[in-house]
Image (cartoon, rainbow, N blue to C red):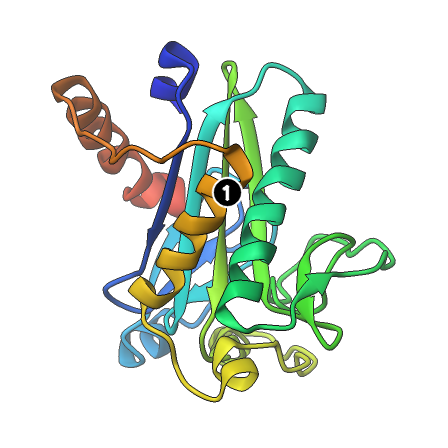
Amino acid sequence: MLRAARSGDAVFRVYGFSVPTLSLGRNQRARGCYDLPAARSHGVTFVRRPTGGRALLHHREVTYSVTLPAASPADASAAYDFINTVLLDALTRLGVPAVRAAAQPAIPPGLRPCFDVPSAHEIAVDGRKLVGSAQWRHGGALLQHGSILVRDDQATIERLLLMPSPATPRAATLADALGFEPSIEQVAQPILESLERTTGSPAAEFSMTADVEQSVERLRASYLGDAWTWRR
């Protein structure tokens, strides 16, 4: 985000997690809510993201992130619409019958998983959420990131809660929609093609610079610390 604010450049990244990782929303209550020994036995680690929203499990999914300049709430709204347009076009290219979800009643903060039900304008298939996204605008820039499920492992979150929780409806997945599990590369390629078509210009490969590497190391130490992960 610092780079986006300084340079005016936008970066669209597609990647995956190396181990199952439960991502907590920025202000989500979590301390004393999860069975940490059970999480370790399942090989699940925890992080807390800078964006809001509820918990989601990064495991058999494809993750995306976008950083870009954004000076106002209107810029954030336009960015959300633009990014979803790119993702929807890419999913259509892949053969997924995805649509923007209709308006739903507001979902209060809590421990239920992010993929419980789709909010208005989120990407869904047959009424079930396929892509979970969140935003954070700060210092003249915006981060939007999210998860595109390949398989639905989100019920693992419920099994790690210390207090019982109602069963979560099954989420949509790429595997269900396509009949096979696409790789990260198979999902990233149509996103790249859609991004270039939507912007009308070729995408340049991101080049890591020394100042960006220094920022990464500083932020990694902060965001991986228990003081941040279990801040509340």
Seen at 67% across and 40% down, the residue is 81
Q: Position of residue 124 (x, y in %)?
A: 67, 67
Seen at 78% across and 54% down, the residue is 120
Identify residue type, mark 1: Arg
Q: Is residue 22 above or below residue 200?
A: below
Seen at 67% across and 31% down, the residue is 78
Of 229 and 84, the residue lying toward us? 84
Q: Position of residue 226 (x, y in %)?
A: 32, 45
Q: Is residue 113 above or below residue 122?
A: below
Of 38 and 123, the residue lying toward us? 123
Q: Position of residue 59 (x, y in %)?
A: 37, 70
Q: Position of residue 13 (x, y in %)?
A: 35, 44
* Mark 1 element type: helix
Local crowd size for mark 1, using a 10 Å CA cut-off: few (<14), some (14–19), many (≥20): some
Which quarter of the image is occupied by the N terminus?
Answer: top left
Quadrant of the rendered image containing residue 203: top left
Is residue 231 among what the camera can see?
Answer: no
Single out the residue that lies furthest toward the bottom.
Answer: 179
Q: Which residue is mark 1?
A: 197
Quadrant of the rendered image containing residue 3: top left
